[in-house]
Image (spheres, grey):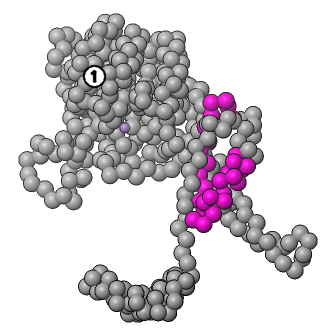
Amino acid sequence: MTLKIAHIGDTHLDTRHKRWPTLQRSLRTMDEQMREARPDLIVHAGDLGEKNPNAQDLYHIATFLQGLADIAPTLVVLGNHDARAHWDVLGRLDTRCRLRMVTSPESIRLMTDGTIWGFDESTVDEIGATRLIAHCMPWPAKGQLLANYPEAMAPEDSDRIALECLRSIFRGWRQEREISGAEKAEVPSILVGHLNLSGARGDQGQPLCTPDVSVSVYDLAEAGTDITMLGHIHAQQYHELVEPGILAWYSGSPCRLSWGEAGAAAKGWILHTITDELVHDIVEIPSPRLWACEAEWTCEPETHPTDPDSFIDVWQFDYIDKPETHAPPFLSNEVGPDDELRFRYHVPEEQREAVKQAVENELGLIWPGPRENVTVEPRIIPSTHARCADIATEEDPVAQAVRYLELERPDLSEAQREDLLPLMRKAVQEVTP
Ligand SMILES: [Mn+2]
């Protein structure tokens, strides 16, 4: 028997998002791809939308969910960005196949007739009529995990205890399958979670740091499921759990939504097929690329073209090579019409106005796409004057004030400075303890 599961996540539906039109196009492509793949179940691993959706956002979220549940029974777990308050209402949408919106950890059974039930609510006791068991873990807020912990704890122990709570849920799920006879009947099982997996990486391969509860591959292995389907991290990737061939997958987001996703990494979803073996097919959704580069506006002295004994200052952009940046010039045939560029540059404070024309010239050289697809981000380097050092060498704050006046206000006469001294002294006394 073959079971096909479409695994998507991090759709972040938000009509107010700058890249909403791109997201809409990507979701339409995904819909077409999924109809062709004909999955038995669709799993959304969380971050369906954003916090505080307005009426228009909710309309699009509802339409999207109806579209999914028109293709196959659909499970959606709550992500950290999702608006919990609307979840129950969304779960009652009129859909062709079953739609289940999951807000707390629970096990779901997909039956041979396509219905989905919670472990406790099923009227069908027959384990033989169960096609799949899906253990669902919505975003585990630390406070929620610890709310029922019977003892007082020191704040520094909270992470460890929260993780222990999670682990005990995972272990419980394995036992649940053993006790119900599902293990013996070899009913396939999956874990669907909106989770932060330690060791997971971003689109540019960067390690991710977060103050939230993170699980490890060993924790996930406690549940003992055939496949783990995750959401939360937008870069598509998989990690091997303890047993070879047993994988935890992040489907990734359907398109590049933020600059954190700049890079060439594929966007799309995963089609997991369970037969005698486990097959994971990556379904790519073509979407505009986000390019990022970072440069420093620097000055090199060069020999004067006509007078070899003198030097002139030549200002130019010096590109900073980092994993998430691309070194220009870009090849024009690689840049698509909807691609975007973020041009970030570091500039000394006194050059901030002078550099503006140079930025436009540089963009003309490196960017073959439309100018309106470029975001320019200046980073001003504050000037430090050598004169400050002179002031700092004076030990007494009043002497520093006098020195400051000498250096910063050479326009004042000796007499004027003398007049200002009592005021400076008073000001210094007020600010010095
Ligand atoms: Mn998330």
The reply, left or right, for residue 203 in relation to residue 242 is right
What is the tally of numbered marks visible in this picture? 1
Image location of residue 16, percent across then percent down: 42, 30
Q: Nearer the viewer, residue 93 or 237?
A: 93
Note whether 277 is above or below 67 in the view shown: below
Q: Residue at x 24, y 53 (%)?
A: 160
Task: In this rendered view, identify the residue nearer to me: 346 or 140.
Answer: 346
Residue 303 in the image, given as x and y percentages of width and height: 84, 73
| Residue 171, quarter of the rendered image | top left
- The answer to whether the beta carbon of the residue marked 1 is less than 8 Å from any atom of ligand 1 is no
Q: Name the residue under label 1.
A: 101
Q: Residue at 36% of width from left, 50% of height from top?
A: 210
Residue occupying the point 46% across, 24% down = 272
Q: In this view, does 327 lie above or below 225?
A: below
- Residue depicted at x 53% and y 26%: 22
Q: Is residue 337 magenta?
A: yes
Tell me where residue 96 sits by quadrant: top left
Q: Name the quadrant containing residue 138.
A: top left
Specify the quarter for ligand 1. Answer: top left
Where are the magenta residues, as a range? 335-363
Residue kind at label 1, given as amino acid type:
Met
Query: In which quadrant will I find the N terminus?
Result: top left
Can you give x and y, in whole percent of width and height, for residue 397 in the image? Answer: 37, 89
Apparent side of residue 27 relative to residue 224 in the rendered image (left or right): right
Q: Please state, as top left, top right, bottom left or bottom right, where the C terminus lies in the image.
A: bottom left
Q: Position of residue 99 (x, y in %)?
A: 30, 15
Q: Is mark 1 on a helix, strand or loop?
A: strand
Local packing at callout 1 (Cα closer than 10 Å; few below 14, some 14-19, many 20+) is: many
